Amino acid sequence: MSFSNEIDHTNANEEIDFGNMPIANAFYKNQIEHNTFNMTVGFFESCKLVQLKTQPEASEMFNEDYAFITGTSQSMVNHFHNVADHLNKKFSWSGSSVVMEIGCNDGSFLEKVMEYTKNTIGVEPSSNVGDMAKKKGIEIYTEFFGSNFSEINKFKNKIETIYAANCICHIPDINDVFSTAEDLLSENGYFVYEDPYLGSMLSLGSFDQIYDEHTYIFSVTAVSKLAKKHNLKLVDCEWIPTHGGSMRYYVTKSDDAISDNVKNWLDYEDIFISLSNFKFFKDQIKFAGDVLKSKLNSYKEKGIKVYGFGATSKSTTIMNYFGIDNSLIEKIYDNSPTKIGCITPITNIPIVSDSEWYSDKPEVVFLFAWNHRKEIEKKYNFSNSIKVLTHLKGDIESTI
Ligand code: TMP
């Protein structure tokens, strides 16, 4: 495998080496020999950023086989419909407003935006999900966002809102993203994006946010500095609970004032996102792995089967870092048609339809889709007697 992105980590204050990892979303029907890459991240204290050191080629990760479909989670669909309403309230879109989404997946956000303006544009390199959005009437460009965007001249200075969710952190050339956004935005236009938040990852111990697709785990400090570099300004931000804690950033060309939100989060990060806290995180996740491995082995010795829930991309990091494979977990339930019947990369755990959950009646579940915990526990009627395992800081104590 070749790497598009060998980032200079000489200035990293600390690194974590997670060992060799496959493509996180490489769910195939049969066992194959997976290409792997060494997954190491660096922590950069001055800009409060976590960044992958090497990354597979983008085409290896985002292609016509892309396995994640937003519509498989009703709570995510609701989330995107609410975001569309929220942004419309904030920006008062008119029928002529042009709204673009970078990485629009199946169009769950833009379909709601179409209630306010029909000028919706999706830039989505994965054709399988992009085609779903096209069927909803959204103008789709099957390509990567950046200065090579084929219609850059057509939309220059015309876009009122550029939105992205769980996407910008995937794009290695972040400077190109910001300068292209600057090119495309109208005079008072806003670039709004949300991604997993570094502060939340450190508090929860949710290191599984780190996988091949996530080049960056951002903070308010990092985005504020990036915006400045590209003649833009981070004027607002909102913490949101998706993925256990994400931040929505509002970046603009306009001379709007910087909100107290931004100032407060910058103060918080000055204290909390420190080198010592990152080093603690590094030790803590290693400890979580030791505890979980010994717990899974003791269940095995007692003949108690452990089942997984949610064949998430991020579970690839957990399983491969901790060494949890099909000898410790029987199968993983999932409702994504693209994943059912496949096995997890390298660890070879079968992924089965979530309908099997009801007949198996598991006693112990490893909840890989921990970020959908409420929705899953409710939908699948989890009883109080089911033991739920996760690698998160708050759950590890009940595991010991
Ligand atoms: P995500 O954390 O990347 O959103 O992935 C969640 C995975 O969990 C996805 O493969 C679908 C699966 N899932 C279910 O099987 N049932 C559910 O009710 C939900 C919410 C997710």
Image (spheres, rainbow, N blue to C red):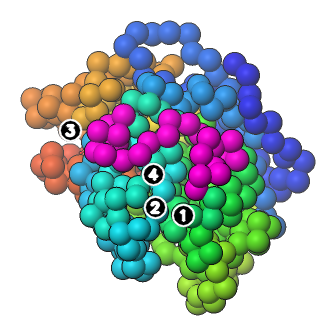
Residue 33 colored in magenta in the image: no
Q: From the viewer's perspective, is the residue at label 3 or at label 4 nearer? A: 4
Instruction: Say which label, 4 or 2, has the lower sequence index.
Output: 2
Q: Distance between the residues labelled 2 and 3?
A: 47 Å
Between residues 64 and 218, which one lies in front from this camera angle? 64
Q: Are marks 1 and 2 in contact (CB under 8 Å)?
A: yes
Q: How far apart are marks 1 and 3 (CA)?
A: 52 Å
Instruction: Say which label, 1 or 3, has the lower sequence index.
Output: 1
From the image, tell me which residue sits under label 1.
159
In the rendered image, the vertical position of residue 349 relative to residue 382, given as above or below: above
Q: Which residue is drawn at 44% across and 42% down?
A: 140
Q: Give the range drawn in magenta.
A: 131-155
Q: Do the residues labelled 4 and 1 touch (CB within 8 Å)?
A: yes
Residue 55 visible: yes
Q: Which residue is drawn at 29% across and 18% down?
A: 341
Does residue 88 appear left or right of residue 198 in this picture? left
Residue most extreme to the left = 359
Task: Categorize mark 1 by other alpha carbons within 10 Å: few (<14), some (14-19), many (20+).
Answer: many
Does residue 306 appear left or right of residue 190 in this picture? left
Instruction: Say which label, 4 or 1, has the lower sequence index.
Output: 4
Between residues 291 and 257, which one lies in front from this camera angle? 257
**Badge 3 element:** loop
Quarter of the view holding residue 89: bottom left
From the image, tell me which residue sits under label 4.
121
Q: Which amino acid does label 2 sit on?
A: Val
In the rendered image, the vertical position of residue 63 relative to residue 33, given as above or below: below
Measured as percent of width and height from the top left, residue 221 is found at 70, 71
Q: Which amino acid does label 4 sit on?
A: Ile
From the image, tell me which residue sits under label 3.
363
